[in-house]
Image (cartoon, helix red, strand yellow):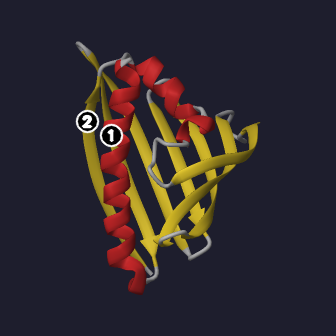
Amino acid sequence: MRTETFVDRFPVAAPPDRVYAHLAEPANSVGLSPLIVAVRDVRRETGPDGRAVVRFVAVERFRIAGPLRYDNILRVTQTATGPDRQLVLDVLSPARVTVRFVMDLAPLDDGTEVTVTVTLRMPAPLRAYVLRTARRVQEYRARELARRMAG
């Protein structure tokens, strides 16, 4: 298994509490990543440490060729580790790929700085594809979140 980590930082023109509320709602994942087309089976819990935990299934759709597609079913555990300041998402894919997103929010004079630390764990033969896809998804997420918060 290979592990890779990268960090992305970007500004969003909205206060941290608004950005956090948007990111913390699983339904908002649809379209926030260009691959996520559905969210289902949302369960809200309180973890043993008292933190809010949300478990859900996200459907990641890959276009293979023309009309052919593959729906990758992701099991997601989202933990509110710092109210209005940090969310951690642990994602498990059937291809033995795991992804941890740590989203840190810091106030700026005119909005929020979002720092996303992405840690990927995958079989070595999938490394290049998984890393390339994760970087593209993160770049898209930054643009889409900024667009959503601007309105």
Residue at the front extreme, as displayed: 66
Which of the two marks, 1 or 2, is nearer to us in this view? 1
Is residue 134 left or right of 110 when viewed as pictured? right
Contact (Cβ within 8 Å) of mark 1 with mark 2: yes
Numbered disc total: 2
Q: Is residue 4 visible?
A: no
Q: Establish if 147 lies above or below 89.
A: above
Q: Quadrant of residue 92?
A: bottom right
Q: Give the distance between the C-alpha atoms of the residues marked 1 and 2, in whole angstroms.
A: 7 Å
Q: Earlier in the sequence, mark 1 or mark 2?
A: 2
- The spot of residue 73 in percent (x, y) is 64, 63
> Is the residue marked by circle 1 packed among few (<14), some (14-19), or many (20+) residues within 10 Å?
many
- Name the residue rendered at 30%, 20% in the picture: 13
- Which quadrant, please, contains the C terminus? top left
Q: Residue at x 38, y 33 (%)?
A: 145
Q: Residue furthest left?
A: 109
- Residue occupied by mark 2: 10
Q: Amino acid at mark 1?
A: Ala
The crowding category of the residue bearing disc 2, from other C-alpha atoms within 10 Å (few below 14, some 14 to 19, many at least 20), is: some
Where is residue 45? Give x, y as percent. Answer: 75, 38
Label 2's element? strand
Per the rendering, the mark at residue 142 is: 1
